[in-house]
Image (spheres, rainbow, N blue to C red):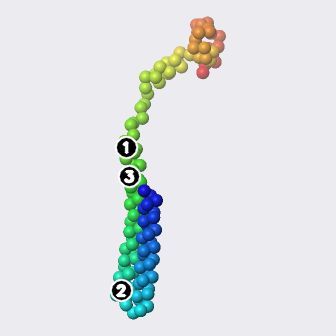
Amino acid sequence: MSRLTTLLACCYLLAAGFLLHCGAASYRDGHHLYAGAFAGTAALLGLAVILDACQREERHDLRAELERATRPPATRASAEDGVVAMALAGACCERWWTSAGAEHDPKHCTRKDQTL
């Protein structure tokens, strides 16, 4: 869609340039009223391009805001986080953690100062 609006804006600017050329030719031939009408119409086309660019930015910002508003909220601490925290608190050393407590007895561990 943005390519189409960009193409349309380019066409508006080309039409405004053509209208300015017609206005200059009309002024040169002494038709001042027509020259003013051509220049005014060209100015309106230029303003249309500027307005479209501003609205395009506003639509982009509104889409981003809507997307942020529709996202589900981030979950804080889940049950799995609590399980992991309890397991980390219960680890007596790195060997116990890597073996999940299967290779040694935590009551007689000599590496208790080497916690994670």
Give the residue at x 37% y 74%: 44
The amino acid on which the numbered mark 1 sits, given as a three-letter code, is Ala
Q: Please, is residue 57 above or below residue 65 in the view?
A: below
Question: Which sits earlier in the primary sequence, circle 2 or circle 3?
Answer: 2
Q: Secondary structure at mark 3?
A: helix
Report how far apart the C-alphas of labels 1 and 2 lie in the structure.
52 Å
- Mark 1 lies on a secondary structure that is helix
Q: Residue at 61% across / 17% down in the picture?
A: 98
Which quarter of the rendering shows the N terminus?
A: bottom left
Q: Earlier in the sequence, mark 3 or mark 1?
A: 3
Q: Give the alpha-carbon distance from disc 2 to disc 3, as whole Å.
A: 42 Å
Q: Residues within 10 Å of mark 3 (few under 14, many from 20)?
A: few
Residue 31's disc number: none
Residue denoted by label 3: 62
Q: Is residue 9 left or right of residue 99?
A: left
Q: Which residue is mark 1?
A: 69
Q: Earlier in the sequence, mark 1 or mark 2?
A: 2
Q: Give the amino acid type for the residue marked by disc 3 in the picture.
A: Leu
Numbered disc 2: secondary structure: helix
Q: Is residue 96 above or below residue 80?
A: above
Which residue sits at x=46%, y=59%? 3
Report the disc number at residue 34: 2
